[in-house]
Amino acid sequence: MTLTLKQDDFFSNPSPRLPVAFVLDTSTSMGGRADYPAWVLKLATSLDGLLTIPAHLAQHGKPTAGWVPPINELQQGLGSFYNALLEDEIARWSVELCVVGCGRQVEILDDFGPIDQATVPALVADGPTPLGEAINVALDALEQRKALYQQAGLDYYQPWLVIMTDGQATDSLDRAELRIRELCKNKRITIFALGIGNDANLKELARVTPARPPLRLQGLRFQEFFQWLSASVEQVSASQPGETIKLDLSGIAAWGEL
């Protein structure tokens, strides 16, 4: 039944598809208090109860003036991205999104489908950072979506994978790294990896983005990043599948740094 419904969507809208999968860090440190550096929160969650932060401090610590939890900014930026795609007459028919949460559980928070039927998922910061597992779940989702496109006879653009984390993986990246290297070698995926904050391990992120170096987000400029991303996605969706598109690399300076 699910497959039939998805194929009906394809037949009613024959536009070429651009599948974009997000792997978003929803670990404890993304909502951590200003009283604790991100590495302390990461350690507390990775030790799974062996190191405990006092609840009254973790929940009621006094943040510095103007401090906003990164998860809140990420939530707002993601919402603006959904809205931007809805407002673009071409992208709204072509772009399909999948959001994978990487925290206490690795789960698909929003699965592929028409953007006008999608709901911006609520992001909750909790748990460790099983990044390797989350990337593999996203890659599986992309492969399954491509198979549906092929079965329905739809053209599609090279899939995109966007990885965002404020720390480092608490599991192995080996399988994800091997899969991504093979996909990049055969030009079957476009990857952007983004480190959030000073504790993000860019050296580790580089393992899963061999085609271009990972970038570090300037402060909490999620809005600027998602504006650039939506413009890039809209540019691709307005082209022909297989056409080479030059992204606005100069625009990266507004939100990212090496």
Image: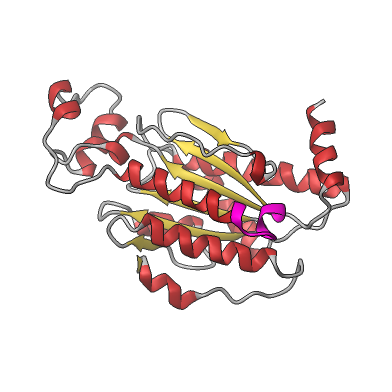
Position of residue 152 relative to residue 258, above or below, is above
Q: Is residue 170 magenta?
A: no
Give whichever of 157, 11 is nearer the camera: 11
Q: Does residue 159 appear anywhere in the picture? A: yes
Total labels: the figure holds 0
Tell whether 116 sits left or right of 71.
Answer: right
Give whichever of 89, 95 is nearer the camera: 89
Quarter of the image for residue 60 reads: top left
Give whichever of 47, 97 is nearer the camera: 97
Q: Residue at x 66, y 58 (%)?
A: 91
Question: In the picture, which quadrant includes the C terminus?
Answer: bottom left
Q: Is residue 89 magenta?
A: yes
Position of residue 223 relative to residue 39, above or below, is below
The rendered magenta stretch, by its main secondary structure, is classed as: helix
Q: Does residue 173 appear anywhere in the picture? A: no
Quarter of the image for residue 175 reads: top right
Quarter of the image for residue 68 reads: top left
Give percent across and percent down for residue 154: 84, 53
Q: Residue at x 87, y 45 (%)?
A: 11
Question: Which region of the structure is painted magenta?
Answer: 86-94
Give percent across and percent down for residue 45: 29, 30
Question: In the picture, which quadrant includes the N terminus?
Answer: top right
Q: Residue at x 54, y 67 (%)?
A: 211
Give the colour scheme shown. secondary structure
Q: Residue at x 28, y 54 (%)?
A: 197
Give percent across and percent down for residue 190: 60, 61
Give percent across and percent down for residue 53: 17, 26
